[in-house]
Every structure is written in C-alpha cells, then in structure tokens.
Image: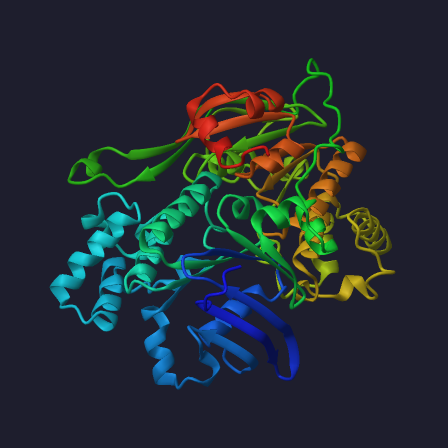
Amino acid sequence: MSTRQALLELQDLRIAFGGQAVVHGVNLSIQAGERVALVGESGSGKSVTALSVLRLLESAQLSGQVLWQGQDLLKQTPAEMQRIRGDEIAMIFQEPMTALNPLMTVGAQISEVLQLKKLLSRRDADARAVQLLAETGIDDPERRFGAYPHQLSGGQRQRAMMAMALASEPKLLLADEPTTALDASLRLQMLQLLADLQQKTGMAVLLITHDLALVRHFAHRVAVMEKGHLVEQGSLVEVFSNPRHPYTQKLLDSRPTRDGLAEPDNPSKPPLLLAKGLQVLYPMTAPGFRSWFKKHYFTALHDADFSITPGTTLGVMGESGSGKSSLAQAVLGLIPHGGELTLDGQFWQGSPRRDKALRQKVQVVFQDPFGSLSPRMTLGEIVSEGLRLHRPSMSEPEIEAQMVSTLHEVGLTTADFPDLLNRYPHAFSGGQRQRIALARALVVEPDLLVLDEPTSALDVTVQKQILKLLQDLQKKRRMAYLLITHDVDVLRAMAHWVLVLKKGHIVETGLAENVLNRPEHDYTRGLLAAFPDD
C-alpha cells in the first residue's frame, strides 16, 4: 500500500441507530484512482457504511473518523457537506427508478446538477448533459435527453444515473449495488463502462455489492463485511486465491453446484407440458387513423415449440424483453395465447371455474419473496389458501397437518419457530420468506413449478441453500420445473434442458450441457460471456 495520503480513510467508524450498534469499528482506505469492492450479504453494514461517508443517514449516531483528503467529514457543517456531495463525492444508487425524479426528464435532472455544481448556463448545461449521456453509452442521446425515467429501460436508467453522478466530475464515486436490477449481459457492460470511465477520469470507485462474479472482473482491492465488522481486506488476488476468514471462504464457496440435480426421466416418456407454435400477442395503438379500422398487435412470443417431461427442468434464458415472462404467463394460463399448449394433455379454457382443476397441477414461485406474500396474512393463512380452494373437503386438522408437513419439507419447523403458523411474513428473513413461497406452491402437490427468478433477490449463501432445496424436492416429488432466469450459474446448477429467447424468438435450445458449454448462436455466447466459468 502506498504511503501517500489516502483520498478517503475510515478510522474506527462506528454507526448506531437508537443506541443499537450496526457497524463496529471499520478501518478502510481508498487511494486516488483505485477501485475497491466492499462485499457482504444483506445486513452486513456495507450500504450504511457508504452512506455514512456522505452523512446521508438520518438519526444515525456516528463516531470515529471519516477522513476526506485529511479532513474529517463528521465534523463538517451541513453547508460544507452540501458542497462535497456531488462536487467531490458522488453516488449511484441500487434502483434508479426510485432514485430518479419521475416528474423530470433525465436530461433536466443531469442539467440541474451541472447548473448547481458547475454554475453552467442552462444552454451549456443541456449540451453537456447530452454529451454525458453519449459518454455513458445511451443511444440517441439527444432524444433520450427529453425522456422521463419510465420511458427508459433498466440499463438506460442506470446509465442516466451514472451520467448524473459524473456530471460534477467527482474524485470518488460510491456505487451501491449498481447492477443488481440488470440482466446478466447488461451487468458486465455497465461494469466495463464504469471501469472505462474511471480510467478516463482518474476518479476512485467504491463498489458495494454481494455479487462476487462482478468483483472478480472489476476491483483492485476487496474488503469483506460480516454483521457490521470488516473481517478481511486485501488485493483481489489475495482475497480470492487465499481467503483467510471463514466468512470470506463461505462467500467464495457459495456458487451454485449441480451435484444434487435429479437424473432426467426417460426422454421417450410423454411430456407433462407441450407447446407447439405458441404465440403471445399484445394489443397496441397504431399512429394515425389506421388504428380505427384495424387492430394492431405486438408479438412478444413467436411460434415457440418446447416440452417438459416429469422430473426435469427446462431453463429459459434471455435479456429483458426477450419474451421470458410472456412465455411463463402463457404456461400459467394467465394471458391469452395462440398455438397449442397442453398441460398433462389438457388445454387452458380461459374460465376460472373450468381451469380450477388444471391450476392445481401448476404453481408459481416469484422473484421477490416479500412482495409475493401478503403482509396482512399469517403464514398459516398464506400456505393453507390453496388447500382450501382446491381441496374444500379437507378438515381443519387435515389442513394443518398438511401445512406443517410441507413447511417441514422446506426447512421451517415449529421447533425452530414457535407459533409458526401465526407469524407474519415480516418476521422472517428473505431466504425464509422464499421457503414460505415454496411451501405455498407445494402444499397442493403440483406437477409443474414455474420458477420466476427464484433466487435473484437473495444473497449468495441463501441462494445456494434454496437451489439445493429445489434439487432435493425435485428428486423426492419428481416435479417438473420451468425455470426463468438470467443467471447462468443457476442454469448450470438446475437445468436439464435450456431454451434461449431473443426478442420473442427461440434462437437455441437443447441439453443444458450442450447449450451452456458449446453454444451455437452468437446471442447465447454473448449471454454466457457475462458469466465466465472460472
């Protein structure tokens, strides 16, 4: 480590809320032009550590020192901190849709920073904002300048956030999970863009993340946090090749594995799910008077052919807008579709009454375990809802026995959680909530589970636990899975077959081993490049 003065230095930083300590004596330094990754799971304290640098934590008790070019930021006046924020230290937040003002165009938001921080005229600020949008890789920056956040894709919004952060030419950029909401290929693109901009401007970057695959391709140094403690730090090579702390070793060992995957059933066995020429169309408004006389449609899924046999997993991969969600909704009978689609030889009828028996055969587990569970229902009400609908003849003792058995199957027992059935979702962790969502789906004993990004909202160690649970359940119950994911590591661990979608078209399909290891299509190779198998 260089002996010159650090750009930023945290000395015995401690953070507490209401007297409860959440960060315990962190010591960390960042040199000018350096890329440092602060790594840890949810609740480790990494985000509040970064926010404390800019003193953005309301009602937090801060002690120790946050030295910015030798000056302690904890002793600066609010006016001085206002000058430092953006001017010298900027921040990119995890979810651009909530960080950007929905009532202002992205160009106006960037221009506002330039007028306030660089004292540019409105005309010069607008011109510079367009230039910044172009530098961050947004296509047609003049047109995007006048777009509102909701009119941009996730990747474009994140690029706009980056342009806003770079507008005042900061010396340090704090990037808090800047790629979490993006597709795999976009994650690598955004990280490469950030690295290029960092080299061009000479700024330092503190990347806050739980994604070790990204850290491997970005950081010079790595610092690891666990439960508010900085447990290990060192160069990228040191930490990844020779981790000393057990927690670091656990994080690095959390990559999903294929070891527990069930052997696929005989391929000659009749398929449980069969799709031939499956199409999904959405009505759209055409410009001018033409829409008065003829209906216009956007085709989200074009003539898809695929099948799933019992006990096997079909993984579907592709970027946002590729048609993954439309395919899943059609399989679940939630949207109208063309072509042929049968589940156990039966068609969706489009009627709640006539489709009731078929709905028991297919269940879904969503991406966000908190958003998919009603906060006003107890765990018992959530898990029993399907049983009461599909098996009305069951008595209350039978329903409770089935619930307890299923919850035990997913790793939630009354021994570990007293009064389990009367608890609400907020009383459980993210991984535990996803187990509840699994139990809700499994309790009616379905033949097919649609898994929509089932682990993307979870930490790496919890992700591995949930995937292992899904592997065990498939072995035990011989269920089929339709797995929607952008995470190639998850596909490697879970899928028997893989289907690749691009703009609604199937561009490649086949055995997972062949598609993931020897892809034939350029688009597939591009997706896999975001998850190198190293």
Report how many numbered discs are placed on residues in the image. 0
Nearest the viewer among 395 and 138 is 138
Q: Residue placed farthest to the front in the image?
A: 3
In this view of the protein, which residue sits in the foreground, 300 or 470? Answer: 470
Q: Is residue 243 left or right of residue 45?
A: right
Say which residue appears at 53% left-offset and 21% top-offset.
Answer: 509
The image shows residue 222 at horizontal and vertical percentages of 57, 55
Write down the quadrant of residue 46 in the picture: bottom right
**Residue 348: x %, y % from top left:** 56, 32
Q: Quadrant of the C terminus?
A: top right
Quarter of the rendering containing residue 110: bottom left
State the residue at coordinates (22%, 57%).
129
Q: Position of residue 335 (x, y in %)?
A: 48, 38
Q: Is residue 177 above or below residue 43?
A: above
Residue 499 visible in rendering? yes
In this rendered view, identify the residue nearer to me: 96 or 355.
96
Give above or below for 500 relative to 198.
Answer: above
